[in-house]
Image (spheres, rainbow, N blue to C red):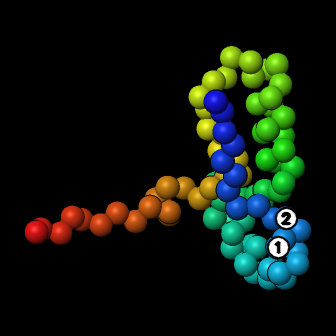
Amino acid sequence: MNSVLPGPLFTPLFYGRGMSDEARETRRKSSLLQIEGTGWDVGNAVSYLVSNMARCVTGHSLIVVLLPPAHRVLQTKKPQNL
């Protein structure tokens, strides 16, 4: 089974909530390729996975929409001595 793992997208939901231009720009800059994803990006990924081009792709989780680099997301803490 394959899956699609979408990251942050700019969708009509965000239009309705009134996301500020500054917030959008900050989020865009935090992505690996410095672009903002849309629902079309996710739809294209799904289209690929259900197409004959992906007939030999199995057990794959396709990450879509350029999440920030791991060093920005993961904050590791040293284990506390018990």
Relative to 11, 54 lies left or right: left
Q: Secondary structure at mark 2?
A: loop
Q: Which mark is residue 11?
A: 2
Tag shown at residue 32: none
Q: Relative to residue 50, is residue 26 depicted above or below?
A: below
Q: Residue at x 76, y 30 (%)?
A: 49
Against 82, residue 61 (above or below) is: above
Contact between marks 1 and 2 (CB within 8 A): the answer is yes
Residue lying at 84% horizontally and 44% vertically, measured from the top left = 43
x 79%, y 47%: residue: 42
Residue 55 horizontal/vertical position (percent): 74, 18
Helix, strand or loop at disc 1? helix
Q: Amino acid at mark 1?
A: Phe
Of residues 47 and 20, the one drawn nearer to the viewer in this rendering: 47
Q: Which residue is mark 1?
A: 14
Is residue 33 in view? no
Above or below, 2 relative to 29: above
Rendering quarter of residue 75: bottom left
The three-letter code of the residue at mark 2 reads Thr
Q: Position of residue 61 (x, y in %)?
A: 61, 38
Residue at far left of view = 82
Res 26 seen here: yes
**In the figure, residue 14 lies in which quadrant?**
bottom right
Asked which quadrant contains residue 44, the reply is: top right
**Is residue 29 toward the left or the right of residue 59 in the image?**
right
How many numbered marks have been drawn onto this rendered protein structure?
2
Location of the C terminus (image quadrant): bottom left
For disc 1, the neighbor class at 10 Å (few under 14, some 14 to 19, many from 20) is: few
- Above or below for 61 versus 68: above
Residue ID at (84%, 64%): 11
Q: Is residue 73 left or right of residue 80?
A: right
